[in-house]
Image: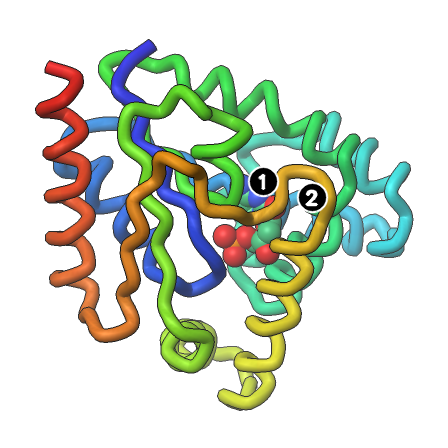
Amino acid sequence: MGFVIAVDGPAASGKGTIATRLAALYGYPVLDSGLLYRAVGVRLLAEGGDLSDMDHATRVAKTLDPATLENPEVRTRAAGEAASRVAAYTPVREALRAFQRTFATQEPGVVIDGRDIGTVIAPQADAKLFVTASPEVRATRRWKQLTGQGEQVTYEDILADIRIRDERDSARSDSPMVIADDAVLLDTTEMDIDRAFDAARRIVETARGQKA
Ligand code: DC
């Protein structure tokens, strides 16, 4: 097992950008685990399925083609909402677990971002960050991203989405979004992405020093 960096946190906290930059810094592969749930939601809907149909979602998760993570459709607002719904189903989570755990075994290390990486997928991770920010700041960031992609959405709608998603992701019984006991909390509310990345890098450097 290489050096595993787990970056958990709620939607639009900056965790994805931090994870990508850490991976570039150390030359590690990065997995955005949210894309797996997004891809399941997108395919379920494309097959005419219903988000309340756990069996259909499970069949999709069991046969997920990792190539579909590249589909731009998985980055839409609707995909995020669908992901949060299918992510509450235990058999869906189980079907996606092996892929994530195998990814985590790569040498010399990996970065994985999500909700349950430091708690369930890789509890043995060498560095664990929990990245957060106020709902308002996260809504502003997500709104800029989505309108930049050409989606017609209001800030108020995005803020409402974020609150619903936080509640659903934290309240589900299987692998809820919680801060691991040994994770370092990084609140990026008052930080731009460069400062947030710098703070994350220092947390990881400390963990690397402890492992060396
Ligand atoms: O990180 P994201 O916003 O792309 O994730 C989309 C949804 O997927 C999120 O609302 C909850 C779910 N998810 C999860 O349950 N576990 C993960 N490790 C990653 C995402």
Alpha carbon distance from label 2 to label 1: 6 Å
Lateral position of residue 13 relative to residue 108, left or right: right
Q: Residue at x 11, y 43 (%)?
A: 202
Disc 2 CB within 8 Å of nearest ligand 1 atom:
no
> For mark 1, what is the residue?
36
Numbered label attached to residue 40:
2
Q: Depth check: give the residue in front, 201 or 51.
A: 201
Amino acid type for the residue under numbered disc 2: Val
Q: Residue at x 48, y 61 (%)?
A: 11
Mark 2–mark 1 contact, CB under 8 Å? yes
Lateral position of residue 80 relative to residue 49, left or right: left
Query: Mark 2 Cα within 10 Å, few/some/many (few <14, many 20+)?
Result: many
Mark 2: secondary structure? helix
State whether residue 35 appears in this view.
no
Disc 1 CB within 8 Å of nearest ligand 1 atom:
yes
Quarter occupied by residue 24: top left
Question: Which quadrant of the rendered structure holds the N terminus?
Answer: top left
Indicate how the structure is coloured in the image.
rainbow
Lateral position of residue 123 relative to residue 76, left or right: left
